[in-house]
Amino acid sequence: MKVLIIGSGGREHALAWRINQSPNLTRLWVAAGNAGTAGLAENLNIRSNEVDGLVTAAKEIGADLVVVGPEAPLALGLADRLDELHIPVFGPSQAAAQIEASKGFALELMRGAGVPCPVFASVRDEANAHAYIKSHPGPLVVKADGLAAGKGVLLCNDSEQALAAVKLCMSDRAFGEAGDTVVLEEYLSGPEVSVFAFCDGEHLSSLVAACDYKRLEDGNLGPNTGGMGSFAQPDFWTPELAAQVEQTIMLPVLRAMAERGSPYKGVLYAGLMLTAAGPKVLEFNCRLGDPETQVVIPLLASDPLELMLACAEGTLDKFQVRWETKNYVGIVMVSGGYPDKYETGFEISGLDEDGLEDTMVFQAGTEFGASGKPVSAGGRVLTVVGGGDSIESARERAYARLEHISFEGAKWRRDISSAANQGAAQATG
Ligand code: AMP
Ligand code: GLY
């Protein structure tokens, strides 16, 4: 199979690494890729939001499968365009991608299907928002409805903060048109977990779960980031919990999407909070998570191309997805200053020392510098992954490998998957 992967982060490097092991692969391209994917595939200089360019590339290559990493091209209708050309695509249609692209859509869908989620209201003008806040004193979560690059969620302890958050979205337009509609949600608490299901529109795979760490500093302090680390699978993710999530969340959503005429194909990602009243959905994403993919994809025992093609072609019921029972831990190395201003262009050393058993380095913001060596080229630079029979041994391997890698200003968390922090990866929001 000739395969084109869309995206340029650690998630896409991990996908390229796993797909590259498939006996079904004949040739691999990544658009736009990074210095890591360059060793496994041919990088194409086309960005994820250049839908026309991506469609043209898929045609020219004669792609047998296009694997879409990030949400932006899906929300722009890339899968629909490829579908018209009969090019199999792993990722949902524009209509189905609404599950991530509009929080109000996802919440209405859940309410209709009886899926557990926070009590909420979706409002289009500030007066209605004020009325709702007045009638719901106490903590609230204010969210920009549209895609806001992970920044449009404002946790508010009281009405005053909620009013300020609404103003930020609606009159200050801090998130542009993404905040023209605002969702007001009940403030939930509990450990968080990311759950992934491969879907073909009608059927879904067995679920796989991971935790990620959004805050910059140890102890879940500091600003939110695109992710500082991850581990899979958490010890609290029991077969009973998986069955409950499948029956009460994933299957009802899949059915509701099909009933609306937008069957869901690709990966359905549920961000859950395990509340005292059971698991509730905080958000859906229409793609794999980053940095969760870097610790989940190594667990995939089945052939990745057969699996993704089965999702695209609606034959997942004939395919048994198998997951390894081991554990992986991933630590993200970021540029000094991230998530605010940071410098790039620093040479990265130690990448080739893969003498350490069961470790991988997935690259994200990297490119080749003038000397031909990889240099940092973004905020999130690498995910260093270790595997093992326990989270503890996986963690030790990941940190041991990380010791060999350096670039100027590099920063990482030292408590990813530490005992005190497991299952509480983001409990502090
Ligand atoms: P989201 O992008 O919707 O997943 O929100 C980002 C983060 O905000 C989540 O990972 C949670 O930590 C927090 N969050 C979102 N919604 C709620 C909620 N209703 N109650 C408490 N925390 C929330
Ligand atoms: N790890 C969170 C996300 O990918 O959205």
Image (spheres, grey):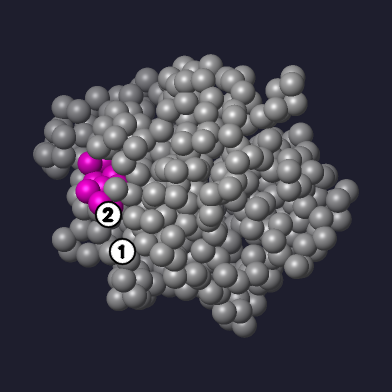
Asked if one can make out residue 81 in the rendered structure from this viewpoint, the answer is no
Q: Amino acid at mark 1?
A: Asp
Local SS, label 2: loop
Disc 2 to disc 1: CB gap under 8 Å: yes
Mark found first going from the N terminus, 2 or 1: 1
Dot label at residue 16: none
Q: Taking 187 as reference, is 376 above or below it?
A: above
Highlighted magenta segment, given as a residue range: 419-429
How far apart are the two marked residues, 2 and 1, measured between alpha carbons? 8 Å
The quarter of the picture where the C terminus appears is top left
Q: Position of residue 2 (x, y in %)?
A: 81, 58
Left or right of 138: which side holds 186?
A: right
Kindly identify the residue that appears in the image at 70 percent across and 23 percent down. Answer: 369
State the residue position of label 1: 235
* Residue 161 as seen in the image, left or right of residue 183: left
The furthest residue to the bottom: 318
Which residue is rendered at x = 14% and y = 33% of the image? 158
Instruction: Give the residue number, with chain letter if any, for mark 2.
Output: 423
Tell me residue 157's x, y (percent): 16, 34
As drawn, is 379 to the left or to the right of 81? left
Q: Residues within 10 Å of mark 2 (few under 14, many from 20)?
A: many
Residue 193 in picture, x, y percent from top left: 34, 55
